[in-house]
Amino acid sequence: MCRISRLCSMVASVLVLALFTSPATGQFPIISARQYTAGSVKLTVRGSVQIDQEVPINVPASYSDGEVTWLQFGVSGSAEPNVLITYGETKEIGVTIGKEKFVATGGIVPGEPSQCTGKTDVAKALVSGHYSCKGIASHDGATGAMGKVDIEVHFSAKT
């Protein structure tokens, strides 16, 4: 029990801010349960690897169950570029890009410094948005080389 009213007010204010403050990049999107039928991502990567490509959504691998969302563009691990955008139960947002054995992952985790900025818009039949991740550590499994990349994704996923 608080005995000092100022201390109680400060603690209450901090708790309210912690509960209602959104990630540094904007509000975490609420995405209802849905299946995706079409869409694509425009992927731009600069740094230790250069990629500039539009990648179609992987319909069977993309879903939202009302709590988590996986938007898979392309096929993970394939020779072609691929992107996975995730929204987790803990309000974490992940952006993972790959091509063959190359991979880089950035994200937004509440309470930690954000690696990415951007936002997602959710409509009845469309989830769309963009994320920019700067200075993300990358790894090329084929050569063992570590590097740094800047990632830019603009995506849409229709239901």
Image (spheres, rainbow, N blue to C red):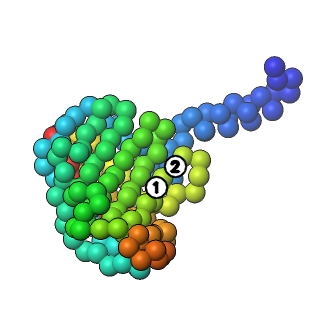
Asked if 8 appears above or below 91 in the picture, the reply is above
Quadrant assignment, res 65: top left
Amino acid type, residue under disc 2 in the picture: Val
The one of 74 and 118 positioned closer to us in this rendering: 74
**Which residue is drawn at the image coordinates 17% and 46% (left, top)?**
59
Residue drawn at point x = 33 percent, y = 64 percent: 98
Q: Is 52 in front, or is 103?
A: 103
Residue 63 point in image, percent of width and height: 25, 39
Residue drawn at point x = 22 percent, y = 67 percent: 80
Q: Residue furthest right?
A: 3
Q: Are marks 2 and 1 in contact (CB under 8 Å)?
A: yes
Q: Is residue 33 above or below residue 116?
A: above
- Residue 40 sits in quarter: bottom left
Residue 107 - label:
1
| Neighbour tally class for label 1: few under 14, some 14-19, many 20 plus, Cα within 10 Å | many
Look at the image and tell me whether residue 58 can be seen: yes
Q: Which residue is mark 2?
A: 109
Q: Tag 1: residue type?
A: Gly
Residue 64 is left or right of residue 137, and the answer is left
